[in-house]
Image (cartoon, coloured by chain):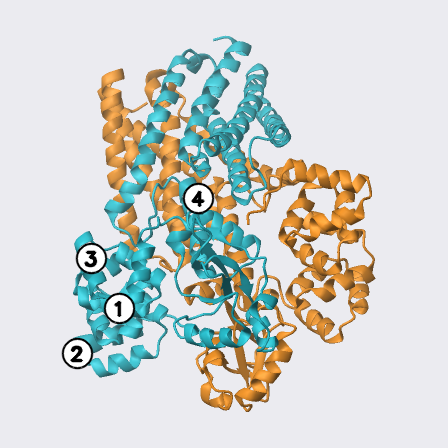
Chain colours: A orange, B cyan
């Protein structure tokens, strides 16, 4: 099975909507996975999407909601009453339901909560609402299978059958004491292979990975990845089991983190997508362009201050773009390796060994580039002393760029600022300014202008 | 539980190794998770790591192997005989075992395979070796629970108990026909909640997501992410169930893809880490620096060709870095959005609507920047016609950069080349050359030099 949206399918759906042929629409769509229907919604206009939304079962539409793009979900929810939204949320897992409620306005939020039918479910959702989004508490759901350490396997299986009715996927069975404190876990495999008479306290595994409600989501992702976990229990300040985070939510966290770093490197301040509006695009991009411009105006003053060289050493000027680009490239390379090292834990703070290695790499690369450049300049322009001045400044500028590229992300990280900023336009333009400054200072020293 | 490597722990371990105090070492390490021991190995020198490796149980060491950095694993395996390696692999899941065997030399590979004790296991591993690494076949493992559609739940449970002994985690129970063709799946939840007398054919779910052995791993990742799957069955050309891919392997694929895109954007050709050698760093970085240099030499010729402007319009020259940086920044922004759009499927090919939007964004940003620049130039240098020339060229250069930034990744994607290259140094330096060309051409048209 491989679902692909085709133009034909979209046209067929649009036609059925215009004909108000609800029956055939339902037949057509009920056969699809909710993630596929969400993909179709992203392609339809909002009236068409809302129309379909109303004719589908709330079991299906509930699952569609979390899969939609934020702006489309917002518009669809605006068209629904509090009661209708509550009906959708009654079908959803607590974590997805809480995420959707969190997007509503304060007044609508309260209305929707009061309309929720299942009181236990409503309590769980309200409980989840108080955790900040970027923590384990914000990611976790309440659906899990837990058993008391004082039970035996038989009671346990009975209880589990009941609990499992409300849990879509059983990952692990958590064992708690009478105070609901997490004590350990039972694997499903153990359950399949152990006799039903064994007491729980004899079979459960006392070693269990867990996180706290306020553990940052990136840390939850790191732990789950490192230990290859598919679900991890979440405990509160007193060690009580309050929820679980599943790997599918963590996959989203990993994707988002990676996307954010990539966008940061590309000079985009906030999450934008190809489908976003012109205004959103400009809001995410123009600030960096303006910052870059402001910094490059400093570079223009540096060049202005060296105007005297324009007449005497024209080849000095024509290599400025080459110098800027090389400094920028080596600076970004250096930063990117540090940023990834900080992210995967292979680099924790300033290490003089690593710093020396980076400078050595820069030195070698710089030497290769400078020798090429010296030969090129000598052959083409024959002004040997100018060529030597350019080559020497080039090495120094490259070393400086590598140094800045290594130290800036480490400095940002130490000061709790996202080090990924260091691979963006801010650092390349700053490198430009310093590079041009150093270049002319050294050339002036050698050539005297 | 939160494990953190401390200097004290490392020193303690090193001391115990030097004292050859195997007993205490075993006590200390047996308490740790294998992923934590792997982290310790990465910090020790190779003799120390090999020493510890020999005193730990093969049950633990087998699990450590897949977690190690490639170079450390290679060195440890070099110190082991074929028989010793085979003992480790007998403990591992088929997919991990196959990955490790694939790294060995051809002769050692055969030796190790002949030493494997479990014949079924050996057959499975050999079977996995023939799939290419970047496909579902290369990712999949053979460990899974499968049942025949003709059985009833009772037979099924008995069979499953036996099969589950060899399977660390039971994700789903796959249903096959007599020819081993995938027919559907049984959820564990169904199993927990269904009476044992029901025939399988009545309870299994006929809708099942699957991939083919040759589906690219990024596509497997996309499907598993979209449908929130924790495992997906893999079928061969004839629809026969041959393995399953689990989400933890997919998390690695997603991470690697994201890292690769990020490194590509930073001008790093192959996967390098902070811990890699100077030689590896240079091999990954110098090629891009040299390509950038070669392209910027073209820029130097363009500047050389406009030397006549150096005397008459000095302010034209001093804004070249600003022009380059702005063109580069907007080009990278445009490319990054396209690259991410292609990756997440929101952009599939050239779309004139998207292209128009991007040009509109560039036009607006360009206008803001140009107006700022015109005011700045007028106030500081008072040469109004030069200021106007600079501003007009700036808009054109920005539009051009946005166009190139949008079209190049789409072109690369269409020609099956990784579009992420378009956010790297190649494109920024190319943008530089064209930018400087356009800038001087327009300035010459307006100012005439």
**Residue drawn at 56 percent across, 73 percent down:** B191
Label 2 marks a residue whose chain is B
Query: Would residue B65 be visible to someone looking at this image?
Result: yes
Indicate the position of residue A79 as horizontal and vertical percent values. 81, 51
Mark 1, residues whose alpha carbon is within 10 Å: few (<14), some, or many (≥20)?
many
1 or 3: tag closer to the N-terminus: 1
Residues indicated by labels 1 and 3 sit on the same polypeptide chain: yes
Label 3 marks a residue whose chain is B
Mark 3, residues whose alpha carbon is within 10 Å: few (<14), some, or many (≥20)?
some
**Residue A75 horizontal side relative to residue B297, left or right:** right
Query: Would residue A388 be visible to someone looking at this image?
Result: no
4 or 1: tag closer to the N-terminus: 1
Mark 4, residues whose alpha carbon is within 10 Å: few (<14), some, or many (≥20)?
many
Query: In terms of secondary structure, where does tag 1 sit?
Result: helix
State the residue position of label 2. B20
Label 4 marks a residue whose chain is B
State the residue position of label 4. B261
- For the residues labelled 2 and 4, the Cα–Cα distance comes to 46 Å
Indicate the position of residue A344 as horizontal and vertical percent values. 40, 58
Label 1 marks a residue whose chain is B
State the residue position of label 3. B110
Mark 2, residues whose alpha carbon is within 10 Å: few (<14), some, or many (≥20)?
few
- For the residues labelled 4 and 1, the Cα–Cα distance comes to 34 Å
Indicate the position of residue B249 as horizontal and vertical percent values. 42, 58
2 or 4: tag closer to the N-terminus: 2
3 or 4: tag closer to the N-terminus: 3
């Amino acid at each position: 099975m491989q679902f692909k949206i085709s133009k034909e399918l979209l046209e067929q759906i649009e036609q059925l909507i215009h004909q108000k042929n609800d029956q055939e629409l339902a037949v057509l769509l009920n056969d699809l996975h909710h993630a596929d229907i969400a993909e179709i919604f992203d392609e339809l206009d909002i009236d068409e999407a809302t129309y379909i939304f109303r004719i589908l079962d709330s079991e299906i539409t509930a699952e569609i909601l979390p899969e939609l793009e934020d702006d489309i979900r917002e518009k669809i929810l605006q068209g629904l009453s509090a009661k209708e939204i509550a009906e959708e949320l009654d079908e959803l897992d607590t974590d997805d339901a809480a995420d959707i409620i969190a997007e509503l306005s304060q007044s609508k939020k309260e209305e929707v909560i009061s309309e929720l039918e299942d009181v236990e479910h409503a309590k769980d959702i309200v409980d989840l609402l108080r955790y900040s989004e970027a923590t384990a508490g914000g990611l976790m759901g309440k659906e899990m299978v837990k058993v008391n350490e004082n039970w035996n396997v038989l009671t346990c299986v009975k209880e589990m059958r009941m609990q499992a009715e409300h849990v879509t996927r059983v990952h692990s069975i958590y064992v708690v004491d009478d105070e609901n404190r997490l004590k350990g876990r039972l694997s499903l495999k153990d359950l399949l292979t152990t006799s039903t008479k064994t007491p729980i306290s004899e079979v459960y595994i006392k070693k269990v990975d867990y996180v706290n409600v306020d553990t940052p989501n990136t840390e939850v992702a790191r732990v789950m990845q490192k230990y290859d976990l598919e679900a991890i229990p979440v405990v509160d300040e007193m060690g009580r089991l309050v929820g679980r985070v599943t790997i599918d939510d963590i996959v989203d966290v990993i994707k988002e983190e990676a996307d954010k770093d990539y966008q940061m490197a590309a000079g985009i301040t906030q999450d934008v997508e190809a489908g976003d509006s012109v205004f959103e695009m400009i809001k995410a991009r123009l600030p960096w362009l303006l910052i870059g411009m402001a910094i490059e105006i400093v570079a223009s003053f540096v060049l202005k201050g060296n105007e005297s060289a324009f007449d005497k050493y024209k080849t000095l000027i024509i290599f400025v773009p080459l110098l800027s680009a090389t400094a920028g490239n080596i600076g970004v390379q250096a930063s990117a390796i540090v940023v990834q090292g900080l992210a995967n834990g292979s680099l924790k703070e300033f290490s003089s060994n690593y710093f020396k290695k980076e400078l050595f790499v820069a030195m070698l690369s710089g030497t290769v580039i400078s020798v090429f450049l010296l030969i090129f300049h000598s052959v083409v322009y024959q002004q040997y002393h100018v060529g030597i001045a350019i080559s020497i400044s080039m090495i120094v500028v490259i070393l400086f760029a590598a140094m800045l590229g290594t130290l800036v992300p480490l400095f940002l990280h130490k000061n709790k600022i996202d080090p990924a900023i260091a691979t963006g336009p801010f650092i390349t333009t700053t490198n430009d300014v310093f590079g041009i400054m150093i270049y002319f200072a050294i050339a002036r020293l050698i050539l005297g202008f």
